[in-house]
Image: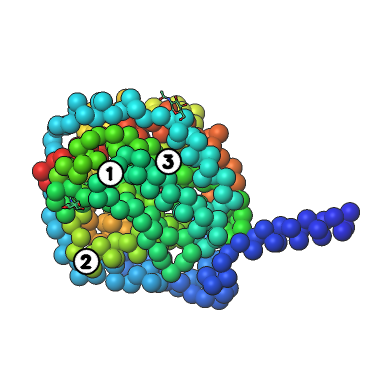
């Protein structure tokens, strides 16, 4: 019995050694985290995970101390007060197919975890990039670039750019990594809802968007980008790296919509509340958020609710800090969100694909309306 147990723990140990050693942190290495604008603390990696488990949100600004510094915040554009693409969007929405979204989510959750320092976290990123490249190639999109954005850790972010007539850029984002907070480096973290659901929502919206011949031929007004961020769970690392780069290059980002957790509805329903799409009201642009709510009213069958989650609770905080107008939409108000996030129980069977479909409808509406808007 004893030998068997030893054997099992040896197996567990070897499967935990999935960290690329170049990125392994020493137990005493200190990271600078920001808990509120200007409020920082130095912590070890272990202390980072303890704070996270206690639902304390932070940005790890160790490598990005200058994000948002001296930023020339441009006035956000005036977003459309009504929808002008209803014919096009209503033709696209019936093409959204949750069988494909579910199958993509099954593949994503099959990686042991999508931890940013793990080889499986790198492999899942490679898989996402391949999906995007295949969709773009199959649709014959002109001038699109789909590429890895590499960081100082092993998991790259993924960025797709479909240039329009102007450099004004509309971004749809989701984070691709997952984490098991009890065992970050090797623990099982399917991350179905958090936040595989956000990834498959925008992937399926992309597949359908690429059936709009105007977008395929680059005759839309504004440039469209899809971002799949690495290392969100470790303190918004991937999105900080990208938005620091965009800030330095003076990129003209006119709208950013982050979706983080788009498929868990049980919490809302069992609390006797109505299924809805929730919008954060803190660390976002109010005008853009109001516009996305109009998109929800026009193209989904759900009501919206307001929610708050404090500083740095997802990648919109990085865009906002860099001075770009950002909005964030999730499956429910903060109290009703998936209780399984960051655990091995965050699995595909807890995801309500009817709800994911509503997020995908919003995504298509948002992208097409803003692709053709004069901003
Ligand atoms: C959805 O996708 C699946 C898998 O590719 C396919 O078998 C099915 O026919 C599609 N459904 C519709 C309505 O297009
Ligand atoms: C697309 O690429 C072609 C040449 O490959 C170029 O002439 C055209 O200006 C590009 N269009 C955009 C919108 O970048
Ligand atoms: C809305 C939201 O942020 N959802 C989750 C997905 O990712 C981050 C990181 O885990 C979590 O903090 C969020 O709860």
Q: Residue at x 35, y 64 (%)?
A: 241
Drawn side of residue 152 relative to residue 306, left or right: right
Which residue matches tag 3? 200
- Which residue is found at the position 24% from the left and 30% from the top? 89
Location of residue 73 in the rendering, given as x and y in whole percent from the top left corner = 17, 61
Mark 1 — residue? 141
Q: In screen coordinates, is 9 left or right of 44? A: right
Q: Secondary structure at mark 3?
A: helix
Measured in 3D between alpha carbons, the distance from the residue under mark 2 to the one under mark 1, in whole angstroms, is 25 Å
Q: Which residue is found at the position 28% from the left and 50% from the top?
A: 144
Label 1 beta carbon less than 8 Å to ligand 2: no
Label 1 close to label 3 by CB (< 8 Å): no
Q: Which residue is mark 2?
A: 249
Q: Secondary structure at mark 2?
A: loop
The total number of labels drawn is: 3
Q: Earlier in the sequence, mark 2 or mark 3?
A: 3
Which residue is rendered at x = 78% and y = 55% of the image?
8
Front-most of 172 and 302?
A: 172
Q: Nearer the viewer, residue 75 or 86?
A: 86
Quadrant hosting ligand 1: top left
């Amino acid at each position: 019995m004893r030998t068997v147990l030893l054997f099992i723990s040896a197996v567990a140990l070897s499967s935990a050694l999935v960290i690329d050693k170049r990125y392994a942190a020493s137990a005493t290495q200190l990271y600078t985290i920001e808990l509120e604008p200007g409020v920082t603390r130095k912590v070890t990696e272990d202390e980072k995970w303890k704070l996270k488990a206690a639902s304390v949100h932070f940005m790890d600004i160790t490598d990005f101390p200058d994000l948002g510094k001296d930023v020339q915040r441009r006035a956000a554009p005036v977003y459309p007060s009504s929808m002008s693409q209803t014919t096009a969007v209503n033709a696209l929405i019936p093409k959204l197919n949750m069988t494909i979204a579910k199958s993509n989510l099954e593949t994503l959750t099959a990686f042991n975890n999508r931890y940013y320092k793990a080889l499986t976290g790198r492999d899942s990123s490679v898989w996402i990039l391949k999906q995007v490249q295949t969709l773009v190639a199959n649709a014959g999109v002109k001038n699109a670039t789909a590429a890895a954005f590499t960081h100082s850790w092993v998991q790259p972010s993924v960025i797709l750019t479909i240039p329009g007539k102007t450099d004004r850029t509309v971004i749809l984002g989701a984070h691709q990594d997952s984490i098991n907070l009890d065992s970050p480096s090797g623990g099982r973290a399917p991350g179905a809802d958090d936040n595989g659901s956000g990834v498959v929502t925008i992937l399926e919206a992309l597949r359908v968007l690429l059936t709009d011949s105007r977008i395929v031929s680059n005759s839309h007004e504004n440039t469209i980008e899809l971002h799949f961020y690495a290392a969100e769970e470790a303190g918004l690392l991937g999105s900080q790296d990208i938005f620091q780069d965009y800030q330095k290059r003076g990129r003209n980002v006119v709208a950013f919509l982050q979706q983080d957790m788009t498929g868990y509805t049980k919490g809302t329903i069992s609390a006797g509340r109505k299924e809805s799409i929730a919008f954060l009201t803190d660390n976002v642009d109010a005008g853009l958020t109001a516009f996305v709510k109009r998109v929800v009213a026009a193209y989904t069958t759900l009501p919206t609710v307001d929610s708050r989650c404090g500083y740095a609770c997802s990648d919109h905080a990085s865009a906002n800090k860099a001075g770009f107008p950002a909005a964030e939409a999730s499956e429910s108000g903060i109290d009703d969100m998936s209780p399984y996030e960051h655990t091995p129980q965050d699995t595909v069977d807890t995801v309500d694909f009817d709800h994911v479909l509503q997020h995908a409808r919003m995504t298509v509406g948002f992208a097409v309306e803003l692709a053709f808007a004069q901003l």
